[in-house]
Image: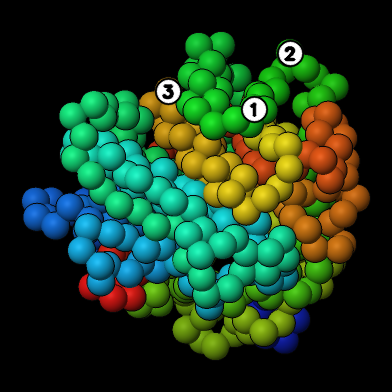
Amino acid sequence: MQRRSFLRVAGGGAIVAATAPLAACSSDLPDAAIAAWRGPGDEPDLRRWVLAHAILAPHSHNLQSWLVDLSVPGQITLFIDRTRLLPETDPYSRQMMMSQGTFLELLDMAARQRGHRADITLFPQGSFGPREVDDRPTALIRLAPDGQVQPDPLFAQVFRRRTNRGAYQSSPPGPAAVQAVLAASSAYPFRVGVSTSEQPESMARQREIAKEAWRIELTTPRTVLESFKVLRIGPREIAEHRDGISLNDPMVRIIHTLGLFDRNVAPGPDDMATTGQIKEFNAHIDGTPAFYWLISEGNERTTQINAGRAWVRAQLAATAQGLSMQPISQALQEFPEVQTPYREIHNLLEAPAPRFTVQMWARLGQGADVSPAPRRGLDAHILRA
């Protein structure tokens, strides 16, 4: 998402902080914030070893809402951290459930790498309702040695995977690369596809829908402020939290240090912070050579989790092909103001709701190298050892 690029200054002025330079190289972020990306090394505890890979999964707003109970030997119980939900932009926690799925997929891959089978039982105490989550576990995992288990080739991309929000090259991905991404996604029973310049009318319409959905989220105060709450500005905050939306641009840091940035005030629709952000996002959308989409029939909680598993596989496959991906989830969200783009993207992709749900819609192309997102480290996710 492009939520990293706007700031409002006290007194009504505004600045725009460009997204791409913030993550141009890993030296822009404190070492402690990205230490998890170095991996678990020779960690002797198998559960901790696989979990150290699972916490590198993509997550909405980078909130990392994964909690695990290790108090039963040989078992991992996964919970969703309900203090890390997004009630404004993700009111039914669909995206949060997908993020549980990305975690489980990387855990499964890591177990395979060590010759173990991950027996995953979703919702062992019953599933959540369609509109809320509670304190019941989302999954129970038991690791068992299995000589028939084969390592997953996509595991090699776990430490290389990035979410690239910057500009992409105009040339579309080649047919072989597209096929590799689609094949990775199809490990789960979803309808997946990639739109390219060979479908000019669809591409043009997808661009229009993406732009309008972003404009709505950006000019709806409560959805903007939800992102403001998880901004981490400067090395100290980034290292302290190691989650959320990191802003480390020198200009932003200066303004923040001077006390001129009020995170409790949403930019107005005509502020430079808003218009500049819209202009930047629209340019990235216009320059995107392909869009990826993943559609489910039904929208049960297990479906949402499996959609997350399919999505991270697609992103890992894209990484292996030298491609970048970025979710453009605004039109897929369920808050009231965005319902027109929601309906439009579903109809355009021949997935009319409520029978079908577009679980993921993303940019696909070749972008510059970017740094990994901050991660809190494994111990921050352990409820009981």
Sequence-first tag of 2 and 1: 1
> In the rendered image, which residue does mark 3 sit on?
321
Disc 3 is placed on an element classified as loop
Of the residues tagged 2 and 1, which is closer to the observer? 1
Secondary element type, mark 1: strand
Marks 3 and 1, how far apart at CA: 18 Å
Along the horizontal axis of the image, is 218 left or right of 315? right
Q: What label sits on residue 192 in the rendered view? A: 1
Q: Residue at x 30, y 52 (%)?
A: 142
Q: Tell me residue 325's x, y (percent).
A: 54, 37
Mark 3, Cα crowd under 10 Å, few <14 / some 14-19 / many 20+, is: some
Q: Secondary structure at mark 2?
A: loop
| Residue at 67% from the left image edge and 69% from the top image edge | 132
Q: CA distance from mark 2 to mark 3?
A: 20 Å
Picture coordinates of residue 198, whole percent (x, y): 73, 13
At label 2, counting other C-alpha atoms closer than 10 Å, the crowd grade (few under 14, some 14-19, many 20 or more) is: few
Residue type of the residue flagged with mark 3: Gln
Q: With respect to residue 343, does 193 lie above or below?
A: above
Q: Quadrant of residue 282?
A: top right
Crowdedness of circle 1 by 10 Å Cα count: few (<14), some, many (20+)?
A: many
Looking at the image, residue 374 lies above or below residue 149:
below
What amino acid is found at the position of numbered circle 2 in the picture? Glu
